[in-house]
Amino acid sequence: MKAGSFDAPVCTDCHGEHLILGPKDAVSPVSAARVSTVTCGRCHDDERLAIRYNLPMDRVPSYANSYHGLATREGSQTVANCASCHGVHNILPPSDPRSAVNAANLSKTCGGCHAGAGAHFAIGPVHVQTATGPIHPAVKTIRWFYWLVIPLTLGFMVLHNLLDFTSKFIRRVRQTDDGPTVVRMSRSFLIVHWGLIVSFTVLVVTGFALKYPEAFWARPLLIWEGHFAFRGALHRAAAVLLIATMAYHILCLASNRRQREFLVAMLPKPMDATNLVQVFRYNLGLSEDGPHFPRFNYAEKLEYWALVWGVIVMVASGCLLWFDNFTLRHFPKWVTDAATAVHFYEAVLATFSILLWHFYMVIFDLSVYPMDTAWLTGKSPAEHFRRSRPEYLRALEIEQTAPTPSANSSLQENHPGTAPDGPSDLSDPSAANDSIG
């Protein structure tokens, strides 16, 4: 103002004129939830001012898309805003040694919220627009990797399932509920499956609610954010449940030799690639004979190992973001940026994989429609296996009728041929191994 620049902000530009309210008032333009968007953003997001004074235009949108900005948009009153880093009445450019965002002062500024931040890492660019701004090569590589993998993977799923559905529709394939059933999920695996259902669903909803806080389905999760970080607490609780579920699954696999047979049966084999080609040939009408699968087909193996890989990636990246003080204390900032990118893109891939791949196999596949009830009862109709896995089903029937030493009660309890439901239920050996149905 002294220099004659009448566009420079004065007291009334930030605090208002006839309704000046304190920063603790929710409707004040300098309240924690509004200072970035209403006050600072009004000038720094103005294209005319940016052109007139050669100001960068990425400050407001890059903040809005950062974790701090997303948390502000969902209603958090404690997350960092513009004033938290740049100051209030002492705002100076980063080149000024007195500035709170000067490179020499970042340790103290960031350390106000993140203990130890700056002591062991060189902070990278903060205001970065993902489409145009400079990003670390590792983060750029991660994004390009997922931008390639996600459409290719989902495109393969859509093509595979569309051809399979069309082929079965033309051939009038229908589920048959009558007759014997096959025990596909033991009690321990049902526990694992339900743990995954609950934890995955909550993680998806609460995770994307942070990314898209204005969405109608996200608003009910965010109504308490001004007083309690409910969404974040629920997200972390679901993460703990997911880790506990997978730990229980690993314990089941390690505790018994028969349990480990499940893992051996899930290992990929060259025959799986042959079966995949045969399925495409059959569904395209190039072959009259469909493939006969072993205990687990290529689709089940793909899904299982994708689950293992996804859990490892999501837990590792999630912990880097959850324990941010540790991450910022021991790693450069690009590690946090990389973890954020991995966490988001892997979540997108996992969510659409469940919707397109798993839901098709257990709901929309005409051979199981309207639903494969193994996730509820642990059993699937034997007729489904008679069409796709006749050799495996015959092996189960032979094992079912094999004599079992009655004196050995422990063997009867664990032997797959001694299902308590009688001859109408064929026990899948994989059921004792926590298999996927």
Image (cartoon, helix red, strand yellow):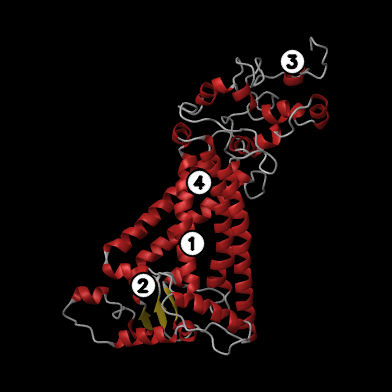
Amino acid carrying mark 3 in the image: Cys
Q: Are marks 1 and 2 in contact (CB under 8 Å)?
A: no
Question: Height in image: 158 above or below 226?
Answer: below
Q: Are marks 1 and 3 in contact (CB under 8 Å)?
A: no
Residue of label 2: 431
Q: CA distance from mark 4 to mark 2?
A: 31 Å
Sequence-first disc among 2 and 3: 3
Question: Height in image: 161 above or below 47?
Answer: below
Disc on res. 11: 3
Residue of label 1: 306
Sequence-first disc among 1 and 2: 1
Name the secondary structure under disc 2: helix
Please provide percent x and percent y for residue 244: 38, 52
Q: Nearer the viewer, mark 4 or mark 1?
A: 1
Q: Nearer the viewer, residue 54 or 376?
A: 54
Q: Are marks 4 and 3 in contact (CB under 8 Å)?
A: no
Q: CA distance from mark 1 to mark 3?
A: 56 Å
Indicate the quadrant where residue 267 lies: bottom left
Q: Are marks 2 and 3 in contact (CB under 8 Å)?
A: no
Please provide percent x and percent y for residue 16: 76, 20
Query: Is residue 250 toward the left or the right of residue 286 in the image?
Result: left
Residue of label 4: 235
